[in-house]
Amino acid sequence: NAGVTQTPKFQVLKTGQSMTLQCAQDMNHEYMSWYRQDPGMGLRLIHYSVGAGITDQGEVPNGYNVSRSTTEDFPLRLLSAAPSQTSVYFCASSRGQGPSQPQHFGDGTRLSIL
Amino acid sequence: AQTVTQSQPEMSVQEAETVTLSCTYDTSESDYYLFWYKQPPSRQMILVIRQEAYKQQNATENRFSVNFQKAAKSFSLKISDSQLGDAAMYFCAYRSEAGNTPLVFGKGTRLSVIA
C-alpha cells in the first residue's frame, strides 16, 4: 500500500528554471492538496483539489500552477523558479471532502533554488 | 479566516515525565475539527490525535490526550510517560466543518526529550 508518493525527494534548481513536483495517491482519495513548509512558518496551503478537473488556490498560490486530470495525480508546477520558493513541499490527500477525514501526507520534496 | 497559534516554539521534557503543548485558535464557526500532527526528523507528517468540536469529551490515544476548551478556543496536547521517540515537531491544525476546506496549521512546537 503505497499511500501518497512524492517525487523527487530532493531537487536543486537554478533561478528561472521550471519544474514539476509529482504527487500520486493510490487510495482513490478525492481531496488532494499541496503545502509548503518553511522554518518557523508551519505548513501553508498552496493549492488544493476536491476532485478531477477541479482546483482552487490556497494561502500562497503565487508562482505555482496545478492541474488534476486524474483522481490519482496532482502535480505542482513551478514555471520560473525563484529563491523564495526554496522550501519543503508536502502533498496530502483525504477521502471525500469531510473535515473529519484524516489527511495522508507524502514524505515531502526538499527544493532548493539557487 | 481561521488562525492557529502555538506560542511555544520549543519545549523539553525528561524521559518518563509529562509535557503539555499549547495551541489556541481563532474562529467564528461552531463546528470544526482540531488535530495534532507529529513530524519526526524523517519529515513524515503523522496524525497523533483528533477532536471534534461538538464533542465535550476530550480525545485520548494511548499516552496522548487533549484538553479541549471550546469557549477559550484552546486545544492543548498532553504527552504522558514521554519517550525518546516522542521527540519531534508538533503541529496543531484546524479544519472547518464546511466542505472543501483545507487544514490550517500552527507554526509548530519542537519537543526535545531528555534521557
Image (spheres, rainbow, N blue to C red):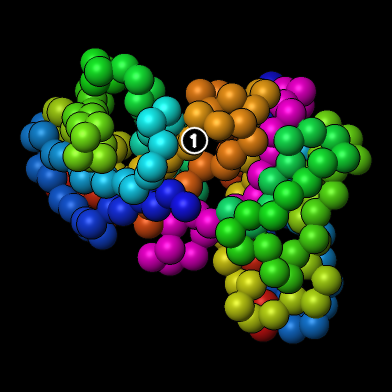
- Residue under the point 69% across and 80% down: A82
Residue type at numbered disc 1: Ser
Mark 1 crowdedness (10 Å alpha carbons): few <14, some 14-19, many ≥20: many
Q: In this view, does A64 lie above or below A80?
A: above
Can residue B31 be spotted in the picture?
Answer: yes
Q: Where is residue B8 in the image (x, y as percent from the top left)?
A: 21, 56
- Residue under the point 80% across and 60% down: A65
Q: Which of B90 and B22 is in front in this view?
A: B22
Q: Is residue A88 above or below residue A75?
A: below
Snapshot quadrant of residue A110: bottom right
Residue bearing mark 1: B96
Can residue B46 be spotted in the picture?
Answer: no
Please provide the residue range marked out in magenta.
A26-44
Snapshot quadrant of residue A88: bottom right
Snapshot quadrant of residue B107: bottom left
- Residue under the point 49% across and 35% down: B96
Name the chain under label 1.
B
Q: Where is residue A37 in the image (x, y as percent from the top left)?
A: 52, 59
- Left or right: residue B56 compared with residue A55: left
Q: Is residue A98 magenta?
A: no
- Residue under the point 67% across and 24% down: A96
Give the SS element for disc 1.
strand
Q: Quadrant of the C terminus of chain B?
A: top left
Q: Nearer the viewer, residue B66 or A24?
A: B66
Q: Where is residue B114 in the image (x, y as percent from the top left)?
A: 15, 47
Q: Nearer the viewer, residue A58 or B9?
A: A58
> Which residue appears farthest toward the right when viewing the image?
A69
